[in-house]
Image (spheres, rainbow, N blue to C red):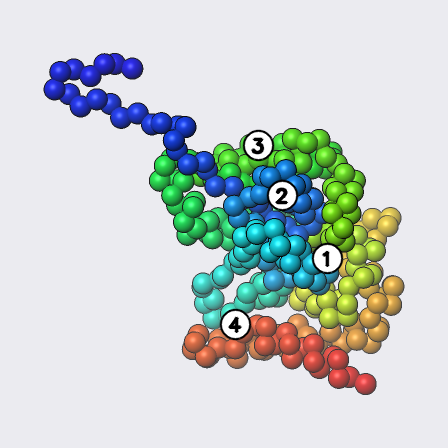
Amino acid sequence: MRPASIGEPAPRTIDILAMPRAPVVLAYGVGVDSTAMLIELVARGEAPDLVLTADTGSEKPATYAYLDVIRPWMAAHGLDYRICRYRPQRFKHWPPYATIVENVLTNATLPSISLGRHSCSLKWKVAPQDKFLASWQPAIDAWARRQKVVRLIGYDASPADSRRHAHALTIPSERFECRYPLREWGWTRDDCIARIEAEGLPVPPKSACFLCCGSKPEEIRTLPAWCLRIIVLVEARAAPRLRTVEGLWRKSTRNRPGRMTDFIRAERLLPADEIERIAAEAPTALKLFQEAAADIPLPDRPHLSDWIAQFQRQLETVP
């Protein structure tokens, strides 16, 4: 460093040791990996400053039920836990929507992952967390000090997560430093399950939207009827616009069809006449609802959730 000349103010130096440490945020997906990571960090005395979940509004019912298990555990360990959500702002002439399911029904399409893209995760999970942290004071203070917020991600040491980790490393960030504790420890998914059980907690279900193309047939079998009806509706609503995929499962394989509706029918998870009624009537009824809503001023316009609730009630009351 060049010494200051006479009469020139000395250059500013930063005392790194005196600087507060950067805040640590754990991105909590309410799944096996992130739950095990959270438990072990607390046990090691390395609890994060914030545990943050992005709720898509369309997670599996079992995932929401697990929050009733893990929230008391987090509270008992003094953890700051928050849930954030994507809040659409512009609806043009559409009824307002607030979840992935409502979004794809509005646009008569499938989740982007079923179309070979991954924008649904960016839109409904990454962006809401970034927006929340932009107003979180510890993050604001860290950025003012030119520090990066440390974000803990639950990728384990399995081959699948290794590929996700390799891709994540290619994405630069000026605000966040991502860390992967499970990979640092060399933990596999089996290690994560064992750690959760050792804590005396039940193992959470696989965390994902209930109509995600990554869902396995056995996972679809466990869904309640109201979720299955939504799956049938989503595929029926999107069908006229599909060109490169068959349905939510994209394309048929030896083990399953490309359309979840065909699986639901073959497995008799819903009555055949109910499936036919949804496919034949619901897309048209939804379109008429949208057209009627377009003439109503936005502050008074009904939400898409209102129509979905009515759709479910009508099917539940059919003898």
Residue 37 seen from this side: no
Front of the two marks 1 and 3 = 3
Residues at circles 4 and 3 in contact by the CB criterion of under 8 Å: no
Residues at circles 2 and 4 in contact by the CB criterion of under 8 Å: no
Q: Earlier in the sequence, mark 2 or mark 4?
A: 2
Q: What is the C-alpha distance between the residues marked 1 and 3?
A: 32 Å
Who is closer to the viewer here, 63 or 125?
Answer: 63
Q: Badge 4: few (under 14), some or many (20 or more) residues near its Cα, within 10 Å?
A: many
Residue 275 seen from this side: yes
Residue at numbered disc 1 = 247
Q: Badge 2: few (under 14), some or many (20 or more) residues near its Cα, within 10 Å?
A: some
Residue at numbered disc 2 = 42
Helix, strand or loop under label 2: helix
Q: Earlier in the sequence, mark 1 or mark 3?
A: 3
Residues at circles 1 and 4 in contact by the CB criterion of under 8 Å: no
Helix, strand or loop under label 3: loop
Query: Which residue is at a point 47% across and 71% down the rendered structure image?
Result: 93
Give how far across and how far down residue 16 sits, in percent.
39, 28
Q: Quadrant of the C terminus?
A: bottom right
Residues at circles 2 and 3 in contact by the CB criterion of under 8 Å: no
Kindly identify the amino acid type of the residue bearing the numbered disc 2.
Val
